[in-house]
Image: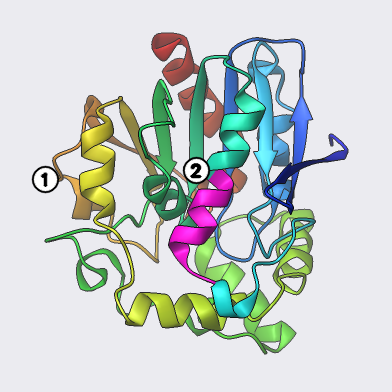
Amino acid sequence: MAEISYVTIDHFTIAYRIENPAQQETIFFIHGNSFSSRSWYNQIKSEALAGYRLIAIDLPNHGNSQAIATTKFSLEVMAAIVGSAISKLAQDKPFIICAISLGTNIVAELLDESIKPKGLLFAGPCIMGEGFEMSKLANQSADLKALFTDEVPADKVVAYFDIASCSQNEEDKAIFVEDFFSVKNNFRSLLFGVLTAGLLQDEIKLVAQKGCPVCIVYGEDEKIINIGYLKDAPINLWNKSIYTIPSAGHIVNMDAPVAFNELLVGFALEIF
């Protein structure tokens, strides 16, 4: 997989991986809670995506990126850093943002006037807003404690992966476990505090206002998010459809990479 590179945003260091740097049309990849840019390896190394400049970012507090100081942590701060990194790395080239899970919240929060993606692909999205609160999007029967707790036994981390993923690939599991324990500065408990206090923007409204096409995809075996909760959201759904991919769970890009990449390529071809 591509080696780690770094970009500095107001003295804050963001790590990223880049593939096919000579290409013009760019796809940014934003991972979810307690993952890293490595979780996109099936996309970064894909021959189907070789015609695009591919940039997978480590979110703040994750992977090789710097951690936000505990006293300054918020989703808004996190999103501003990621948005600045995207703007700097885009280099005025046309781009799509592909995000998964918590990454979709971060992307929605960073959609200010300076960020101009040609399209968004949201995998396993959990964006929220008025009328689209946590109670509607989350599968209440799923045990998600590991995602919001800093000290978690390894067996509980593996148990969460088995809820989130249909993958039987031991490398996928090993990447997740290693990434999980690499998260810095009590990120998960800070995130829990943000969510329970409702310290979010209206992410649905922000995506709707941006107006660009949004491709939404879930795994058919999704156990964390209620697949239908966005069907009436006022966003510009690509082909007016929400896509599902067989034999895949919440981590759809890992579980069914071939099908996921085919969808992403089809979206990119039309958008670019």
Q: Residue 7, how many percent across, how many down? A: 76, 40
Q: Quadrant of residue 132?
A: bottom left
**Left or right of 269 on screen, residue 160:** right
Residue at which label 1 appears: 232
Callout 1 touching callout 2 (CB < 8 Å): no
Secondary element at tag 2: strand
Above or below: residue 236 compared with residue 127: above
Q: What is the quadrant of the C terminus in the image?
A: top left
Whether 74 is among the magenta residues is yes
Range covered by the magenta-colored residues: 73-82
The one nearer the camera, 258 or 47, is 47
Q: Quadrant of residue 57?
A: top right
Residue type marked 1: Asp
Residue type marked 2: Ala
Q: Residue at x 56, y 28 (%)?
A: 261
Q: Residue 62, how many percent across, how many down? A: 69, 62
Q: Residue 204, how many percent across, how many down? A: 23, 49
Q: Residue at x 52, y 64 (%)?
A: 164
Residue at which label 2 appears: 99
The 10 Å Cα crowd at callout 2, few under 14, some 14 to 19, many 20 or more, is many
